[in-house]
Structures are given as structure tokens and as C-alpha cells.
Amino acid sequence: MQGNCIKLIRFLDGSVTFKIPVYQRNYAWKKENCKRLLDDLNWLHDADKETHFLGSIVAQNTGYENYWIIDGQQRLTTVSLLLLAMVKRLEEREEPKLAKKVLNKYLIDDFESNDNKYRLHPIKHDFEDYKKLFQSSDNYAIRSNITENFEFFYNEIDKIRDLEDLFDSIGKLEIMALTLDKNDDAQLIFESINSTGLDLTDADKARNFLLMGESENRQKEFFECYWEPIEKKTDNNVTELLRNYLIVKTKKIPTSNRLYFTFKEYVEKNDVDRRELFKELLQFANHYEQIINARTGNQNIDYILRRMHYLGYTVQYPFLIAILNEISLGILNLSDFESSLLVGNL
């Protein structure tokens, strides 16, 4: 691992492509974060300061001038949105020289085509929204955090008379750039960086743990075929699914503040095959969806599930999931399930 404090502009300059792996969260910075960044840039100019530390960016060199962003995607994406908003405004003000410089040095590679020309590759849906920003505003994605923050920058920087001053301030931003090689354990480094933060959920950490060590193709397959459907079926409450999964598998209730580490220990101790684990988690997510939506196909069961959901009886979910899992394996049937629920609800 190599690390040094460098200007962000220098980090972005060149023919390198920065890819956000699928195990990372979607872009999540809000307008208040973007406003704070603009305020810092204005302060840099007004106070005539030379540098401002933005934070760290951890990247892993995967070869062929590709880097996976292990940590720092929020900062990198936000600055890219700001630079793109600058390009749009510079073009409108008929300042093509600076617009072309920013676009070709930090945002796209003119020698590449299609998706390969973009220097930054956010994860799946974010990337689609990001690419649309290079087109006409008629094509922008609606209800997108990527679009909303871009438009915030686009509107705010219109109030700035000289965009060269803004670009100079961006040039003063410094980052701690940590570059990992193939021998570095990206997962351990990621956990260490985020060990004291509250931003990542246990589900975020579990997703990173399960996907980070896989090849790019397997990451994409596991994410699209398993993790994404799991998120949808649980209404993005994957952390609760993991808690229920561990209760069923270990017959113990995991401590809330150690849920992720308990999950990780279970997977490593039992040497669980990743594909089989994803299949099982998806199956549990199917059962979870049946429970929270009361859709088992049995009218009496569904009535009881709706009543339990209304009363907030979530403590019984592990038991219910275990029963539905036994039914899916052919060990029990819905009549057995109905009988057990009727006994508990007399």
C-alpha cells in the first residue's frame, strides 16, 4: 500500500478510469454536503488559502489503468459533478478553452468510446444517471441524487462571476490518496477506515465483505442476480434479514452492535460457499417478503400475518421464516404452518 497527500486535481488527471464496485452504496451525498463543499471553495478564494484537506480516497489498482474506489466515492463523485456543472456553465458563457480543459483532463477520455470514455464509473443506476448529465437537460434522470446535486452546483455556480477562480480553488483541494496493490487486503482496510463511522449499515458491511474479494464479473453476477433482488424483497431492510438469518442458522440472537461481525464469523467459520450463501439469503428474502406482505397463498395464514404485522410482532419473524423454509424444502406444508399459527393465536 502506498499513500501520499496530493492535490485532488492531480489524482484525477491522466487516462485512469475510476470504477465504483457494485458492493459500494449508491451515491448518497445531500445538497447540504454540496453546499459545504462550495462554501469551503469560496472560503479558499476569499481567504487566499493555499490548500484545503478534503479527506482520503482509497483505490485499488486492478491493472489496465483501472482503479476500484474502495473508499471515498462520495467525495470523488461530488467533485466530478461540480466539474461537469462548471463545463456546462463555461460552454454557455462561451469560454470553450477552460471548458474543454476541464472536460478532457478530468471527466472524459476523447480517445475512448461508449462507456469507456468516462473517467468515473459510479455503480449501476448512478452511472446511467451520470452519463445523461453529459447530454441535453431534457435527458436528465428525475428523482436522482446524482441529478439533484449536479443541478444544485449548476444553479449555484451561475452566481459566481469568474469560474476560473472556482477552478483555482478546486485545484487547492488535497486528499490522502492510498493506493492498494493486489497483495493488500482491501476488506480489512475498508473495515478499519469505517470502524468508527455510523454511515454504513450492517447490510452495507456484509455486502462489501461478500463481494469485495470476488472478480469483477462475479461481483456483477452476485449483485444483480442475488443482492439487488434481496434488497427489493426486503424493502431495503437487509440488516433485519441478516439478523433473522443468523437466528435461524445459529439458534442464537446476535448482539445488535456486533451483527455484522457475527455474520462474518459465521460465514468464515463454516467456510460457506459464496454462491450457495447468496442463494440461501435470497430464499430467506422470499420468505421475509411473504411475511411482511402477508402473501403466502393461504387466506387464514395471511390474515394472521397481517394482524401480527399491524401489532408489530417482529420477534416471531425468525420462527416464521424457518417454517416457510421448511415448506420450501418439502418438509412441511402450509397446513402445518396454519396449525402452528392458529395455536399461537387462539
Image (cartoon, rainbow, N blue to C red):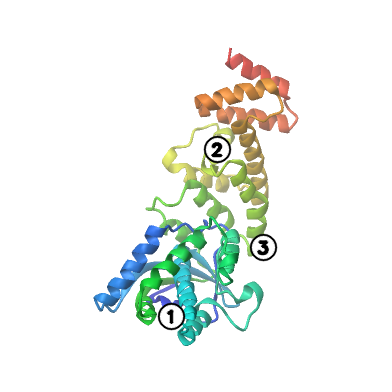
Q: Residue at x 59, y 59 (%)?
A: 125
Q: Residue at x 38, y 53 (%)?
A: 197
Q: Residue 140 versus residue 63: which sits nearer the camera?
A: 140
Measured in 3D between alpha carbons, the distance from the residue under mark 3 to the one under mark 1, in whole angstroms, is 30 Å
- The answer to whether residue 281 shows anywhere in this view is yes
**Foreground: disc 3 or disc 1:** 1
Measured in 3D between alpha carbons, the distance from the residue under mark 1 to the one under mark 2, in whole angstroms, is 46 Å
Q: Residue at x 48, y 69 (%)?
A: 81
Query: In what quadrant of the picture does the C terminus appear?
Result: top right
Q: Which residue is mark 2?
A: 246
Q: Which mark is residue 217?
A: 3
- The answer to whether residue 213 shows anywhere in this view is no
Residue at disc 3, secondary structure: helix
**Foreground: disc 3 or disc 2:** 3
Residue 159, by quadrant, is bottom left
Residue 17: percent from left, percent from top: 56, 74
Decide: is 195 above or below 120. Answer: above
Q: Which mark is residue 10?
A: 1
